[in-house]
Amino acid sequence: MTFLGDEGRDMLVVKRMIVNGEFTLLGPITSIGRMYMGPVYYYMISPFLALWNFDPVGPSIMVAVLSIATVYLIYFFCKKFFSARSALIAALFYAISPLTVLYGRASWNPNVVPFFSMLFILSLSIASIKKKYPLLILAGFSLGILIQLHYVTLLLGLTLILTFLLLIRPWPPLKYLIALALSFILGYSPFLLFELRHKFVNTQNTVRFILENKKEDVSIPLYISITAIVQDVTVRLFWRLLIVQSAELSKVFILSIGGIIFWIFKTKKIGKNSRTALLIILIWFLSGLILFSLYRGITYDYYFGSLFPIPFIILGISISFLWKLKNSALKIVCFGFLLYLIIVNTLHSPLQSKPNNILTTTEKVSQFVFNRVNNRPYNFALMALHNSDHAYRYFFDLWGNPPITIQNPALDPERKSVAPELWVICEDKDCKPLGNPLWEIAGFGPAEIEEEWKIAQVTVFKLVHL
C-alpha cells in the first residue's frame, strides 16, 4: 500500500473526526489547486480506521474489498446482459490488470471510483432495460458519491443524460425521475451543504477553471486537435489497462474491436436487451471521450478510473461473440490472444515487485523521533521533493505529542510558536537542512545540527538554536 503525505492528511482528518468530533463538509484539495472535493471519502474510511485501531491499513482494506466487489459487478453485468463466457473473461482480466491492482490496494479517494462507476452503470442499465425504475435511486445516489470522489466522474452525469435522451423510451414515470434527483442530492449532500453555506465558492472556482482552461492551455499545445486527444485517450485506456506491453498492439486491438462491434450491430445476432446494454457501454465511453477532449491539462492514469471497466467488458463481449461463430481457426486465435494477455498482465503485475514498506518505514522513523522528543515541545520539517509531512504528523498526532507549527511573525510577533528544537526528516539524497529555504526550517531561525541519524532510507536531524 501507499502511505505518503496525501494518505497521512486523510488519516489526520478522519482521526480528528473520530476522536475529537471535528466533522467536516470539505474533502481533499485537487491536484490543480483552488478546488476541493467532497468529504464522502472521509466518512467512508472512518469506520475502517476505527476498527483497525487507527492503523492506516484499515482504509486500504476497505479499498481492496470494494475493488474485489468491482470484479463481481463486472461479472454480474456481463452475465445478466450478455453471457457467462463474456462475464468470466471480463472479470478475469479486470482482476489481473496491473493498473486495477495498483489502484485497488491503497487508500485514496480516486481508488474507489471504479466500484461506484460500475454500480452506477449496472443500476442504470437494469432500470433502463428491465424497467426496474426503483434502481434509478441507486444510480442517482452513486452519482452523488462519485462527483465527491473526483470531478472527472462528471462524465457519468453526461452518460445519464445521453442514455435518457437516446435510449429510454418511454421515460420512467415522474415519481422515479424525482426519486433519481433526490437520491443524487442525498449522495451529494455533504458537499452541497458546504457549498450552500459558502455561496458555492467551490463551484465558482470549478467553472472559472474550466473557462480559463479553454482560453489558456499550459500542458498540451493548442495545435493538437480534439481528434488527436480522443485517439490518445482511447489508446491509453486500452493500453494501460489491458494490452499493457505495447501501445501499437493496442491500436490494432482497438480497430479490431471496433470492427467486431460494428459487425455485431450489423448482423443483429444479439438480443434487444444485449444491444441496449452495449449501447449504454458505448455511450459511457463516448461521454469519457467528450469530457477528456475538453480538458487540456495533464491526464494521469487514475483520471480514467470512471472508465476502468469498459475495456474489459468490451473484450468479454467481443471474444464471446467470435467464439459463437463456431470457426475452429477463430477459436484458436481467440484462445491464443487471451493466453497472451494473461501472461503479459501477470508479468507486469505490481505483485511481482517487492513491497515498498512505506507505511512501516514512516511509522518506524516517526517512532524514533517521538521517543527522543520525550514529550518536549518541538517543531518539525520534512525535506522531500515529492512528499508532504502529513504522514509523519499523523503518527505524532496519534501518539499525543504533535509538533508545534511555526506561525508567520505577523501572527506570532513574540515567536512563541518556535520551539527549542527542530526535528528534520530528509528523504532526499542531498540532505543539507542548515540554510534551507523551507518555511518550517527558515522560520526556526539560525540553528546548528546537534545530532544526526540514518534510519532506513531517510536521515533524521535534530536542530537547536544558535
Image (spheres, grey):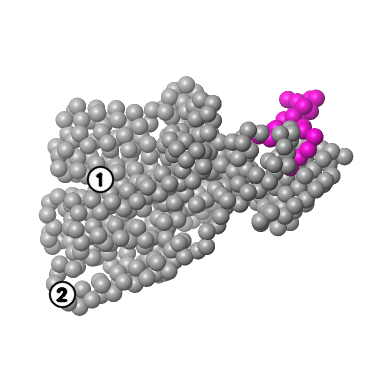
Residue under label 1, please give it: 122
Q: Residues within 10 Å of mark 1 (few under 14, many from 20)?
A: many
Quadrant where the C terminus sits is: top right
Q: Residue furthest right?
A: 466
Residue at 66% x, 56% y: name it: 456
Residue at 32% x, 67% y: name it: 253
SS assignment for the magenta stretch, majority: loop
The disc labelled 1 sits on which kind of residue? Answer: Leu
Residue 289 percent location from the top left of the image: 36, 51
Residue 90 percent location from the top left of the image: 28, 59
Residue under label 2, please give it: 327
Q: What is the span of residues highlighted in magenta in the rendered image? A: 402-423
On the image, which quarter does residue 415 sit in?
A: top right
Up-down relation of residue 77 to residue 134 (above or below): below
Instruction: Give whichever of 354, 232 is nearer the camera.
Output: 354
Residue 180 percent location from the top left of the image: 26, 32
Residue 214 percent location from the top left of the image: 48, 44
Q: Per the image, is 354 magenta?
A: no
